[in-house]
Amino acid sequence: MTRSRIQVLPDILVHQIAAGEVVERPVSVVRELVDNAIDAEATDIAVYLENGGRRKIRVVDNGIGMNKDEALLAFENHATSKVHSLEDLKAITTMGFRGEALPSIASISKVKLKTKREDEPAAIEIAIEGGKLKNVAEGSGQKGTDISVSNLFFNTPARRKFLRKIQTEEQKVKQWLLQTAVSHPAVRYRLFFDEREVLNLPRTETKLVRAQALLRGPSVSFDETHDQISVSGVIGHPGQATANTNSFVIVVNNRIVRDPLLYKAVKEGYDSTLKSYESPLGVLIVDLPATQLDVNVHPQKSEVRFANPQELFGAVRDSVYSAVQKFSFAVAAEIRRPDSFIQPSVSGYQRPIPLLSTQQQSGFDNHDLARFTERVVETETPLAAREGRSNSFESKFDSSHQVESQVFLFSELKYIGQAFKCYLFCEKSEVLYVVDMHAAHERYNYNLIRNGFRSNNINSQNLLVPITVELSEEGALNCLNNEDLFQRYGFEIESFGDATIVVRSTPTIMRESLVPRLIKEVAEISFDGLAQGRFEEVIDHISARIACHASVRSGKEMAKEEVYALFDALDSTEFSAACPHGRPVVVKFSEIEIESWFGRDK
């Protein structure tokens, strides 16, 4: 076989190779076109999909538009208005910069572009099929750009067969648009599926306001500055955690990104309340100098690199941790219902209802929407009439999902009784509160134990009869090699043979009968080569296990005096909204909700 000579690839093939990196599916096209609209200073962007984007993707904006020369040049490879020098590449502030998107999209579809600058007498219309220019003409039109991408992958059928069902492609677009709306609050976004409006997000004053409006369920917001790094966002209650990592959105310098470092910082900020496989619900917004960020590391611009990653990690972790501590209040009982969803309404905002309609269930999946929801506002008002009107988006936001303005105190609850030997029923101000007694006691003990460990001040007691625990040889050696760690938790251990250790003292809050089980759990933890962050996770895990074993168990009947003593203890601790595993400690039911169960609200 004769080896082929090296030769320069034709432009059409270069574009199709680039398209393989830039365009995976309809949402990739929408992302690139919307990013271009934002860079063009658009304040109103409408996205139209036909047949899930297979037949047509259309994006209309009111940006600055282009003249004829700019419009033609935009489809040339690596033609861009955003980068002119190497210095520009080191401090990118625009959404696009590569100059690859439009030629890549045009090489695998049929594109029609209509654009007009305000100072130009006519609009420019361009048609391109498979990367080949078909027509250039003048026409009438408004300032801005209207671009349609039809028959995606028409000349690359192997790529087209990888597209998913219509509903799946629509969900991907809807999810991305909801997320990117957070990063550009001054833009009004609309989304249409086969001429049916499914999203209408009005402009807001800040990213934080937009994030608060899109997030459902009990949440707290935060806004902090660490040197040159601004860290803000909205986080959901630990009890809302899900296995879907898309439930948490990260925005860095107005760009939606995937970043393992920041995601880990967020999870560490949640402390022990999240299991290893759980993802929190929320939005993280990071703003830092452009020179400290490299966005030129991924064709789709979804990955970034930081100049000072450890400094940023600490800033995000500490900000999220401080915000989580604000969850010291009762949450609505709907928090654990995965099917609760805020329905869009043209007349304003509605409260969550328990089930989706059959039509909605077949069209959309809550989990695929990253547990975000939209609130559609009135659409009949023309854009021009809306320009001078201030938005009431924040004021319309359902305050039942935000942190209670007053400090919540367990000691102010009136104890009524106990149910199932586990739940404590209380009332206050026309609200019924239900407290999980084990989760409550576990949270208090966890804070006590972990804070005691960090201050090296855990009370211990000598056992009259030492406890022997049989382990594997590896487990026994693991415990003995970390004897100082056990001592800081109040345990005194020593060897009692090759695979047995003897426990001579324990923390005062620890029940002796549960000591062997705890020792066996800790013995299975590998401490070798742990980084500081991982070591903190182990400390939290051990503290949680001790707290669990030391807390009142389900099945115990608590006296009224014990209940009020528990409530006083909860008020004295810094975080009492969730147990160390993230489950809610207390939920509430309003009198109105309860009356509706029995039809008394009619």
Image: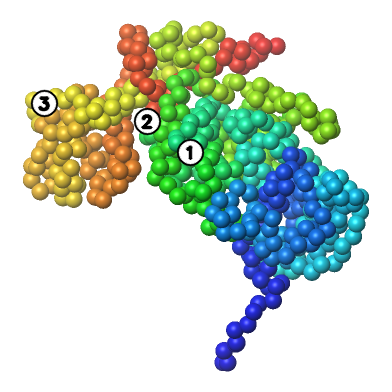
Q: Which residue is more in the foreground, 151 or 386?
A: 386
Residue wearing tag 1:
229
Residue wearing tag 3:
462
Mark 1 or mark 2: which comes first in sequence?
1
Q: Is the residue 26 above or below the residue 485 in the image?
A: below
Q: What SS does tag 1 mark?
A: strand
Residue wearing tag 2:
580
Q: What SS does tag 3 mark?
A: strand
Q: Is the residue 350 above or below the residue 529 in the image?
A: above
- Taking the image as shown, residue 526 lies to the left or right of residue 312, namely left
Q: Quadrant of the N terminus?
A: bottom right
Name the spot of residue 246 as percent of width and height, x first: 55, 44
Q: Is residue 340 visible?
A: no
Mark 3 or mark 2: which comes first in sequence?
3
- Counting other residues with Cα less than 10 Å from the Cα at mark 2, is it few (<14), some (14-19), or many (20 or more)? many
Mark 3 or mark 1: which comes first in sequence?
1
- Counting other residues with Cα less than 10 Å from the Cα at mark 3, is it few (<14), some (14-19), or many (20 or more)? some
Q: Specify the amino acid type for callout 2.
A: Pro
Q: Are marks 3 and 2 in contact (CB under 8 Å)?
A: no
- Taking the image as shown, residue 383 lies to the left or right of residue 20, namely right
